[in-house]
Image (tube, rainbow, N blue to C red):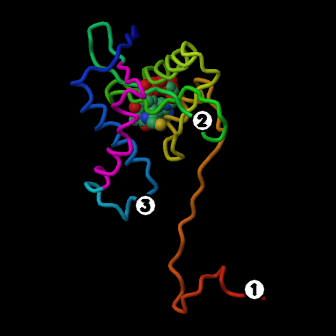
Amino acid sequence: MDLRMRRARRGEFPTIWAATIETVWRDLPEDEKARLDRTAWEGHIRKRLEPYVESDRTEAWVAESADGTFLGYLLVGPGGGYLTQETHGFIYDVWVAPMHRRRGIGTSLVRWAADWARSKGYAKIKLEVAETNPAARRVYEAAGFRLERAYMGRVLEAPPENGQSREQRPKR
Ligand SMILES: CC(C)(COP(=O)(O)OP(=O)(O)OC[C@H]1O[C@@H](n2cnc3c(N)ncnc32)[C@H](O)[C@@H]1OP(=O)(O)O)[C@@H](O)C(=O)NCCC(=O)NCCS
């Protein structure tokens, strides 16, 4: 497909926000979601994502077809500088409109992001993906990304009646 990339227009940010928030919500661990009020959470996440979705820090790019149909978007910008001093390119989000999925657009967007990062002088591009999003993981792997690190979590069971967790009880 003949994809054209251009910077997102102001009127497209409501779509970008809604899709980004939906993806983050969908990929939250179920046990955490069960404790959240969605409306209150949306207020929280909008503030946290503001610097990555709609700010001078990142760039929002839209993929459109030759006839100008909105096919998807990409949020890219600098990342890293935490574990090492090096910054690299970072994909903050990639999204393809549902009716245009499985046509290679996601893969093209991710490859385009790698070219974008190279053109900015970065030696590497990174991203974060949820364990529960195998579709995106396959797209990234097909575009040459490899797992480097993973978050791990453990749900903690309620303490027993006497208030001591198993770990606190003396070992025999
Ligand atoms: C992830 C996403 C961007 C993929 O976009 P896409 O245009 O459908 O991806 P592609 O067509 O390039 O898919 C390439 C390959 O990835 C795999 N893949 C993509 N979507 C898949 C799915 N839903 N189930 C299983 N495999 C999938 C397939 O191997 C596919 O190749 P094939 O169609 O020849 O079998 C899209 O599903 C999306 O927007 N999801 C919601 C947002 C999201 O999760 N973003 C990632 C945040 S980390």
Q: Amino acid at mark 3?
A: Glu
**Mark 3 to mark 1 CA distance (whole Å):** 31 Å
SS class, disc 3: helix
| Residue nearest the observer in this picture, 26 or 149 | 149
**Mark 1 to mark 2 CA distance (whole Å):** 42 Å
Query: Height in image: 104 above or below 67?
Result: below
Circle 3 crowding by C-alpha within 10 Å: few under 14, some 14–19, many from 20: few
Whether residue 113 appears in magenta in the rendering, the answer is no
Between discs 3 and 1, the one toward the N terminus = 3
Q: Which residue is mark 1?
A: 171
At 44% from the left edge and 62% from the top edge, which residue is drawn? 31
Q: Amino acid at mark 1?
A: Lys
Residue 32: give its label. 3
Query: Height in image: 8 above or below 140?
Result: above
| Residue nearest the observer in this picture, 96 or 121 | 121
Which residues make up the magenta segment?
41-62
Circle 1 crowding by C-alpha within 10 Å: few under 14, some 14–19, many from 20: few
Quadrant for the C terminus, please: bottom right
Coordinates of residue 57 in the picture (x, y in percent)? 42, 29
Circle 2 crowding by C-alpha within 10 Å: few under 14, some 14–19, many from 20: few
Between discs 1 and 2, the one toward the N terminus = 2
Determine whether label 3 and label 2 are within 8 Å by CB: no
Coordinates of residue 70 in the picture (x, y in percent)? 29, 19
**Marker count (numbered):** 3
Residue 81: give its label. 2
Between discs 3 and 2, the one toward the N terminus = 3
Asked whether, in this view, residue 164 is left or right of residue 70, the answer is: right
